[in-house]
Amino acid sequence: MAHVASLSQLQTPRWASVDGALAPYADVKVHISAEALTRALSIFEGVKGYWDADSSTFMLRSPLAHLQRLRRSARLFHIPFQIDDEEWVRRHRQLAAELLVPGRDLWLRPTLYVTEGHWGEGTVATMVITAFTQTQAEGDPMRLGVSTWRRGTDVDLPTRVKSSANYVVARLARIEARRLGYDDAILLNREGRVAEATGACVVLVTDEGIVVPPSSEGALDSLTVRIIEQLCLREAVDFTRRPVDRTELLAAREVGIAGTISELTLVDEVDGFRFPVDGLLRRLRDAYLRVMRGQDHLPGVDMVPVLTAADVAARDSPVTANGTAPH
């Protein structure tokens, strides 16, 4: 799964979106004194775009759901953020239209960087959207370790806010996991219960059906998990959000992690305990991808068209391609 974890490190796209205008990716800067750097004060989302099953049309998955969550994060962190639904979608479609590659999906990262202000006075934020292509191939099952690092509580650093600062401890946990030979780590909370993985939520199969730790346990309020819940409802699979002890994780029937980038990735090992990868979670993963590829429809999941394959071919033709910024 290294291709998932390192998208932004392995790619240098031509363009980014800065407050609604396209700019060369290499030229986007944040001042050294900005609170985005001095206090890690930035919040973000991850919007995924998919080619449909026959690679004819590219679509964004539920972009307005991500906008709603970003608005909540901005409000809780006292970051001014005024953008309407139409403009949000326009910015994502504009950037996606320039960076699309046939046969590869796209992950867009809209980030609000606090660029002016001091300790909550005079706060101004700049919205930057970057985008990176992602393979359509199914990732291999992952090996996870339970980290010695802990997820904080809601009054330490709330996980309901998708904040860059929340990923500092995740970075430490992932470094520890890789040192021990694992692909990723699971963070426990202060009570020793399961919170989440470093960049995705934990999904278990138990005797009850699907079990997921809630936000009150230190997990992000995941939009992907909401879709999995809807799939379970349709397929008459019991779905429960509740606290999960470490031993329950290790004794689970199946384990997976869920997030916008990782989708629903299967886990075949946690701390030496092995799990099957051909059961309920695989079926849910396949059902999830059918929705993303436009082969199925699920209420509440909006797929917003961006470009067709013919549009991309025309964009890249010698007649229309040039080195200037698009309008």
Image (cartoon, rainbow, N blue to C red):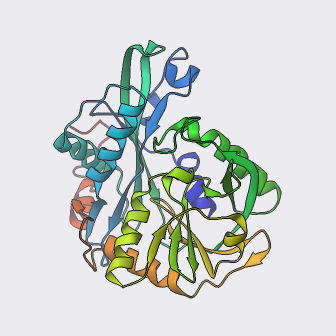
Specify whether 138 is left or right of 246.
Answer: left
Q: Report the residue at 56% width, 23% height from top.
A: 39
Q: Reply above or below: 123 against 132.
A: above
In this image, 252 relative to 154: left or right? right
Q: Please report the residue visible at 26 percent of the width from the left and 33 percent of the height from the top.
A: 20
| Quarter of the picture holding the C terminus | top left
Q: Quadrant of residue 109?
A: top left
| 127 shown above or below 303 | above
Q: Position of residue 116 (x, y in %)?
A: 42, 15
Which image quarter: residue 32?
top right
Residue 77: image location, x then y, percent: 43, 29
Q: Residue at 44%, 74% (x, y): give it.
A: 239
Looking at the picture, how far across and down is residue 200, in whole percent?
54, 58
Residue closest to the eye, 245 or 9: 245
| Residue at figure coordinates x 82%, y 54% from the top left | 179
Task: Name the one closer to the observer, 27 or 92.
Answer: 92
Q: At which x and y percent is residue 184? A: 68, 59
Question: Residue 49: in sight, yes or no?
Answer: yes
Q: How many marks?
A: 0
